[in-house]
Structures are given as structure tokens and as C-alpha cells.
Amino acid sequence: MIIAVDGPTASGKGTIAKALAEHFGLPHLDTGLLYRAVGRQVFLDGGDPDDGGDALAATSFPDSLLDDPHLRDEDTGGLASRVSVHPAVRQALYERQRGFATQEGGAVLDGRDIGTVIAPEAEAKLFITASVEARAQRRFLEMRGRGVKVTLLEIQDDLRRRDERDRNRDVAPLVPAADAMVIDTSALGKEEAISAAIEAVADAL
Ligand code: C5P
């Protein structure tokens, strides 16, 4: 059983994917981390994230980089969004994601193109979304909690920029798969969103 969870930044897809993995007893892969690692590696190499060659070279990042706390930084998210437009980068990360998705017993993957590209045969596809305002507010509280100095407006601007880049890129743009179940979490608390997702997956199986 493959569960694909796609959606924009700060929609709640990561939290939901983790909860689904626990509920259904499946391993979970946050595919955004792979793109973040590539973005971070380009930065460490002093390369240009908009240059396809530099970005491709960075896909051979060491596995230890996946534990780097800087991967969660907003700056790294921005770099990830820039390196992820290059088709060769997406291709280089494909096998790893595909292998995880097709392991025996099944898996939960979250990202932008799981239901459309990585595992189009997934038994359950969720597309988690929320308004920019709701997503910015969540990110704002989370960052403030970590002591990061940032304004709500800065976060909204950054989210809009990333959404636009993710939605309008030529390869694997952020769109719900035709057969995805869309869950809007704007007005839902964490537990409500998780319950809605578990119900949607149970219905799909
Ligand atoms: O989900 P997260 O915010 O960690 O992803 C960071 C960036 O990586 C996204 O903005 C997106 O551009 C890219 N990404 C992608 N495909 C995925 C996962 C992430 O293009 N499957």
C-alpha cells in the first residue's frame, strides 16, 4: 500500500504524513528533505542553485547531510525550491524515492509530485492545502517558537514566491493528481486534519 501526500509548504502535509505512517504502520519519507539537502549542498559548495550543472552535482550529497539541522531553515527551503526546477535534479532523486515507495509492505511519502510522478499507482492520494494566510500564520508561530526573528508579512511573501515557483515550473509542477482527495486544512486544528486524512485514506483502501 502506497500513500501519497502532496501539497504546498506549511499546508500540514508533513504532520499528516507522519501521523498516517504511524496509524497504518508504514515507513515514511519526507521527500522535501532530499531537495533541501541538494539546496544546502549547493550552498556549501559555493555553487549557484539556478545553474542546472551546480545543482546536479549537489545531488551526490552525503547521507549525513540529511541530519543537518540547517535543512529546516527557511533559507534552505528557498534553495530547495530553486534547485528542484531542474529536470536533471528531479531525475537524479527519482530512483531513491521510487525505491522507497515500492518497498515491500508499502510506504507513505510526502512531497509535491508523489501522486503524479513518483507513485502514480498509489492506492491513496491526498492533496493537502490551506490558504496562504493560514499557512503563514502556522509557520510564523513555529518560527517564533524557535526564537527566529521574522514578520508575518515576510513569511507570506516567501510562501507566495515558493508556491508560484513550485506551481509554474515545467517539470512536475505542484498540482493535485486527478484522483487525489483534496483536504483544506485552513480551518482545521492539527488533530482534526489528521482525522480527516485517516478517514480519507481508509475510504480509498
Ligand atoms: O516540502 P518542503 O518545503 O520541505 O520542500 C522544499 C522544496 O523542495 C519545495 O518548495 C519544492 O520546491 C521542492 N520539492 C519538490 N518535490 C518534492 C518535494 C519538495 O519539488 N517531492
Image (cartoon, rainbow, N blue to C red):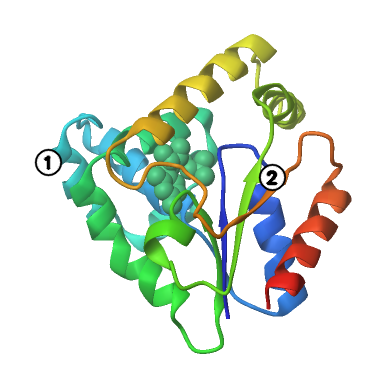
Q: Is residue 74 above or below residue 157?
A: below
Does any atom of ligand 1 lie closer than 8 Å to the CB of label 2?
no
- Residue at image position (29%, 38%) is 85
Q: Quadrant of residue 19?
A: bottom right
- Residue at image position (44%, 74%) is 100
Which residue is more in the foreground, 74 or 90? 90
Q: Which residue is mark 1?
A: 53
- Residue at image position (77%, 30%) is 145
Dot 1 falls on a residue whose secondary structure is helix
Q: Amino acid at mark 2?
A: Gly
Q: Which residue is mark 2?
A: 12
Does any atom of ligand 1 lie closer than 8 Å to the CB of label 1?
no
Dot 2 falls on a residue whose secondary structure is loop
Q: Is residue 151 left or right of residue 123?
A: right
Q: Is residue 78 above or below residue 197?
A: above
* Residue 179 % position (x, y): 55, 60
Q: Is residue 198 left or right of residue 95?
A: right
Q: Is residue 198 visible?
A: yes
Which residue is more in the foreground, 138 or 176? 176
Q: Nearer the viewer, mark 2 or mark 1?
A: 2
Ligand 1 appears in which quadrant? Answer: top left
Q: Within 10 Å of the Cα at label 2, are there few (<14), some (14-19), or many (20+) other Cα atoms? A: many
Q: Residue furthest bottom?
A: 104
Measure the C-alpha gap from mark 2 to mark 1. 32 Å
* Residue 138 % position (x, y): 74, 30
* Residue 52 % position (x, y): 16, 38
